[in-house]
């Protein structure tokens, strides 16, 4: 458990660094370029991420097979071949549909005659390649190294984007930053991969297919949750509303940093334990992760309900002019509380080599998400997207709980979760009292209130829950 704690801690630190860098950069982008320009960028990246869904399935298969096989080099090689073939196929399809894609994205004319299809193809190739190498490193069990590279990528991307925007770039500066950051990872990660490129056999391709034919839809579920609402919004609303929705989405995403870290580090551990039938160890690791998964999500929801408008004001007038921003943020934060558990459960099911179960969950999730988004967006606009997505993730979470194998007897620590709720309520009382004395109208005061609220929450939590203190201490201080 010590190795998992250390890996989780490093993954968490990396996620914090990525998130802080991304949040600061997003505030700068929206304030400097306007929320409508940010909307063009968001819609372009949503399209890229949807196209990469099959590629993510390849990545999951490679990570799984590398983690539990002695033929690591062959699975690595087969994965690279499949990934390259996918990128070439996607590029061809994009070229054939270039008029429709360009019309949908609506990007303004770019430098050197670049259009949406050219940009999407370049980013698709770079990000897909970077992710396959990171998947191999993670499958090799080298969690700390992969976390470091992910951290570099996550900080380099907004850093490049800010630099390009400073020098006068618009939406294409943001997209160029995406490409060059991924290209850097592609250049350095192959050097540290232990596996070597060899000639794969048909058996490696078959095993990747056997796992990937189910797992890709699990990743489609993840993409559906993250980007489907944006894709459908592109059919109904303007770029400013899309940009505002993404701002709220990114704020709420701060609260899933911890479960995302747990999920990534749990996968290879659970995969290894399952091959040894160590279900008791799996139950202990997963149960502990689930108990602490909402550590940020619960206080995040309470804080968003109280000072959500103030937090949105940090992004500038172009966001606060959109009256629906607060409602979107509040609804998405509700969904994040549920998602905190869902992230871990889906990773566990995949690690247990149960892709057929995640396949069924994903089918139901994707269909419900598409239907709900289509109906609710057409009726309620951008707020409907938040309701549809949060509702769909609740359905998916319930199905994931039912899909866990009978051998996995999870034990939730209700005391830990109750302490998070009580600490959040204490924080709420303090914030409401402060608002009565002085409304957080200035940006500086908003930041002060956020800082005080977080401090009150964690102090209260440390007093209420000794188990939480021990868990955090074990993650931070482990040296084994």
Image (cartoon, rainbow, N blue to C red):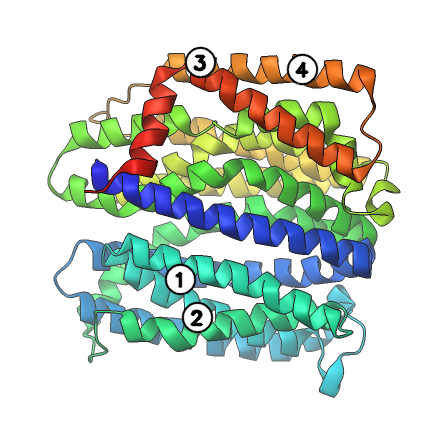
Q: Which residue is mark 3?
A: 463
Q: CA distance from mark 2 to mark 1?
A: 7 Å
SS under mark 4: helix
Q: CA distance from mark 3 to mark 1?
A: 36 Å
Q: Position of residue 461 (x, y in %)?
A: 47, 18
The answer to whether residue 238 is visible is no
SS under mark 3: helix
Q: Position of residue 254 (x, y in %)?
A: 57, 40
The answer to whether residue 449 is visible is yes
SS under mark 1: helix
Q: Quadrant of the N terminus?
A: top left
Q: Earlier in the sequence, mark 2 or mark 3?
A: 2
Dot 1: few (<14), some (14–19), or many (≥20) neighbours within 10 Å?
some
Q: Earlier in the sequence, mark 3 or mark 1?
A: 1
**Marks 4 and 1: CB-CB under 8 Å?**
no
Q: CA distance from mark 4 to mark 1?
A: 39 Å
> Residue 229 versus residue 206: which sits nearer the camera?
229
Q: Position of residue 120 (x, y in %)?
A: 61, 71
Q: Which residue is mark 2?
A: 185
**Corner quadrant of residue 328:** top right
**Corner quadrant of residue 446:** top right
Q: CA distance from mark 4 to mark 3?
A: 16 Å
Which numbered disc covers residue 430? 4
Q: CA distance from mark 2 to mark 3?
A: 43 Å
**Marks 4 and 3: CB-CB under 8 Å?**
no
Horizontally, residue 130 falls left or right of residue 167, namely left
Q: Which residue is mark 1?
A: 149
Q: Earlier in the sequence, mark 4 or mark 3?
A: 4
Q: Earlier in the sequence, mark 4 or mark 1?
A: 1
Q: What residue lies at 58% left-to-right and 53% top-to-bottom?
A: 21
Q: Quadrant of the C terminus?
A: top left
Farthest residue, direction bottom: 112
């Amino acid at each position: 458990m010590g190795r998992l704690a250390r890996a989780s801690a490093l993954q968490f630190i990396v996620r914090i660094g990525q998130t802080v860098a991304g949040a600061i950069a997003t505030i700068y982008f929206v304030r400097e370029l306007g929320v409508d320009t940010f909307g063009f960028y968001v819609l372009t990246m949503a399209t890229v991420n949807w196209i990469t869904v099959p590629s993510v399935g390849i990545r999951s298969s490679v990570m799984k097979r590398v983690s539990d096989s002695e033929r690591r080099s062959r699975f690595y090689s087969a994965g690279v071949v499949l990934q390259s073939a996918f990128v070439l196929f996607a590029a061809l399809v994009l070229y054939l549909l270039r008029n429709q894609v360009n019309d949908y994205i609506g990007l303004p004319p770019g430098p050197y005659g670049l259009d949406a299809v050219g940009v999407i193809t370049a980013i698709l190739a770079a990000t897909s390649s970077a992710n396959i190498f990171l998947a191999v490193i993670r499958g090799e069990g080298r969690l700390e190294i992969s976390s470091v590279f992910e951290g570099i990528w996550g900080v380099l991307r907004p850093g490049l984007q800010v630099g390009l925007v400073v020098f006068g770039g618009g939406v294409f500066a943001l997209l160029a930053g995406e490409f060059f950051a991924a290209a850097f990872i592609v250049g350095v990660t192959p050097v540290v991969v232990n596996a070597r490129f060899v000639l794969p056999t048909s058996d490696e391709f078959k095993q990747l297919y056997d796992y990937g034919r189910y797992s890709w839809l699990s990743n489609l579920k993840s993409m559906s949750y993250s980007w489907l609402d944006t894709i459908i919004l592109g059919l109904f609303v303007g770029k400013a509303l899309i940009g505002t929705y993404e701002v709220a989405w990114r704020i709420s995403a701060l609260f899933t940093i911890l479960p995302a870290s747990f999920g990534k580090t749990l996968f290879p551990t659970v995969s290894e334990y399952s091959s040894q039938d160590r279900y008791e160890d799996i139950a202990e690791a997963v149960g502990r992760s689930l108990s602490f998964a909402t550590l940020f999500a619960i206080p995040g929801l309470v804080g968003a309900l109280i000072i959500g408008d103030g937090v949105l004001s940090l992004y500038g007038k172009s966001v606060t002019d959109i009256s629906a921003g607060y409602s979107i943020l509040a609804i998405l934060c509700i969904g994040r509380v549920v998602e905190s558990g869902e992230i871990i459960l889906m990773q566990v099911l995949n690690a247990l080599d149960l892709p057929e179960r995640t396949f069924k969950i994903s089918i139901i999730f994707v269909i419900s998400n598409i239907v709900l988004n289509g109906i609710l967006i057409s009726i309620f606009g951008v707020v409907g997207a938040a309701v549809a997505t949060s509702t769909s993730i609740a359905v998916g979470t319930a199905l994931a709980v039912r899909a866990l194998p009978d051998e996995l007897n999870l034990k939730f620590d209700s005391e830990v979760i109750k302490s998070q709720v009580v600490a959040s309520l204490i924080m709420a009382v303090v914030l409401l009292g402060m608002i009565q004395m002085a409304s957080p109208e200035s940006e500086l005061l908003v930041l002060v209130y956020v800082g005080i609220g977080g401090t009150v929450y964690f102090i209260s939590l440390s007093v209420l829950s000794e188990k939480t203190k021990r868990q955090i201490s074990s993650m931070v201080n482990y040296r084994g």
